[in-house]
Amino acid sequence: MQELTISLNPQSRTPLYEQIYRYIKEDIKRGRIRAEEKLPSSRALAAYLEVSRSTVDLAYEQLRSEGYLEAVPCKGYYACQIDGLYQLQPGTGQRERPVSCGESTYDYDFTPNGIDLDSFPYEAWRRITRNILLNDRKELFQLGDPKGERELRETICRYLYQARGVNCRAEQILIGAGNDCLLLLLSAVLGTKRRIAMETPTYRHAYGIFEQLGFSLCTVPVDGSGMQVQALRESGADTAYVMPSHQYPLGIVMPIKRRLELLAWAAEEEGRYLIEDDYDSEFRYKGKPIPALQGADRQGRVIYMGTFSKSIAPAIRISYLVLPERLLQECEESLCRFSSTVSRVDQMTLNQFLKEGYFERHLNRMRTIYGKKHDMLLGELKKLSDLCRITGENAGVHLLVELINGMTEKESIEEAARMGVKVYPLSEYEIGDPGWESSQVKGPAVILGYATLSESGIVQAVERLKRAWRRE
């Protein structure tokens, strides 16, 4: 049986279960723990590390669900054979996080990344796709415009003006297979000799992509209005990545005064730009959606980014950039080296989905569904007012819950897991010094996404959280 000499850091923001998970996973990948080798029992390892057994159980179950461990009834956990699997290279600069796959180890998962798949308009999507293929449009199987299909770009242009107040022409729109691809294409347009400022906490995935592309990065603290402009000036950045309509993960809506301050910063020097990530603006439950920052831009400084991943489905993989007029020449010169990254059939299916009104009806339906789930979760959490405070409500598909019951973030996650409920740490989104704590969130906090849960599931999950966070 393998003896594990794991060195844990109780002062780290990384939960203890994740530290154990990472150590064992790395040992298995590097061959230090050989295939079919037995690991210590969770009880024995917990006693050795002086942690709760549930902490070790959580790490073991994560490793089992990802295929690194096999649980043999009445015998214990054994390392799996992974020789020949693709190995991720270290040094990406992005914090590795466990991702559940295979059989879930939780009864309720408050993931902030999912959507309600039961409500996807399958019939309409199938019918449109079938009709497009029946029309014998052979040209759709040739390489298309690197920017994307002209018809779809014109349709998106009209939609953005009506729904988000974005002013643009079809020539300014660039379609790509998800935001990852768009950031790659944007790096080709802007060049990578830039210093990009990002909020903290922020969307870590984008941070990791920028880092891998070779950009110089810095972080800027946020307050109750969003990115602090004076700190942005002091950062030396020439580009700022912001989410003004619904900051992720804090849920801040940037007021017009701060938006104008950011636009003024961008106009102070030639070559400065704001990248506006408008990832879930369609879902707002009080009042109308907040207009895009791009609509207030008169100097051509805002690069607008949107996606259909949240509003329709992640697997469709269709996102878009709206470039300022001043970048169009660089775009044309750069894109000659690329081909379109999205299937032309999928693009035309989406185009008809938008033009025939299915998208608008789908959005209205999803706003109602998510609005009910939002109100249900908010109402249930308010019953826990002695345990937590809620921020970031009335938009998006997640809430931020600040713990006021004396628990640390790690303890709140572990106790929730013990009750079969998965919640997500806010600390995972921090980069550098979290200067937002004093003005936005004063204590440990977790993120609760509600899109994938049913209304009854939300009620039952919060009831378990109540027992977990009261240690009942």
Image (spheres, rainbow, N blue to C red):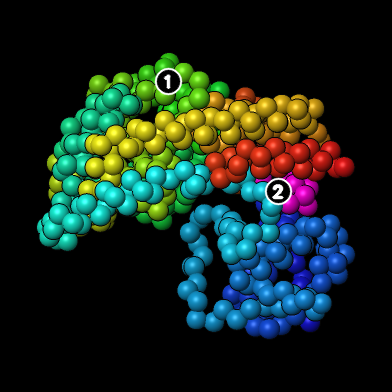
Of the numbered discs in the image, which one, if any, rests on residue 288?
1
Magenta segment main secondary structure: helix
Looking at the rendered structure, the kind of residue marked 1 is Lys
Residue 89 in the image: x percent, y percent? 48, 68
Picture quadrant where residue 48 is located:
bottom right
Q: Is residue 458 highlighted in magenta? A: no
Above or below, 77 against 393 in this view is: below
Q: Residue 117: x and y, percent?
A: 48, 48
- Residue 173: x percent and y percent? 22, 39
Q: Nearer the viewer, residue 148 or 272?
A: 148
Figure quadrant of the C terminus:
top right
- Say if 221 sits above or below 457 in the image: above
Secondary structure type for disc 2: strand
Tell me if label 1 and label 2 are in contact, CB under 8 Å. Answer: no
* Mark 1 residue element: loop
Residue 435 or 242: which is nearer the viewer? 242
Q: Which residues are magenta?
A: 410-423
Taking the image as shown, residue 63 lies to the left or right of residue 359, namely: right
Residue drawn at 63 percent across, 72 percent down: 68
Structural distance between the alpha carbons of marks 1 and 2:
33 Å
Indicate yes or no whether the magenta region holds residue 417: yes
Q: Label 2 sits on what residue type?
A: Val
Residue 338 sits in quarter: bottom left
Which of 279 and 259 lies nearest the eye of the viewer?
A: 279
Give the residue number, with chain letter if any, for mark 2.
421
Q: Is residue 138 above or below residue 398?
A: below
The disc, 1 or 2, on the residue closer to the chain's N-terminal end is 1
> Can the viewer see residue 314 in this picture?
yes
> Residue at coordinates 50% horizontally, 20% vertically from top-left?
286
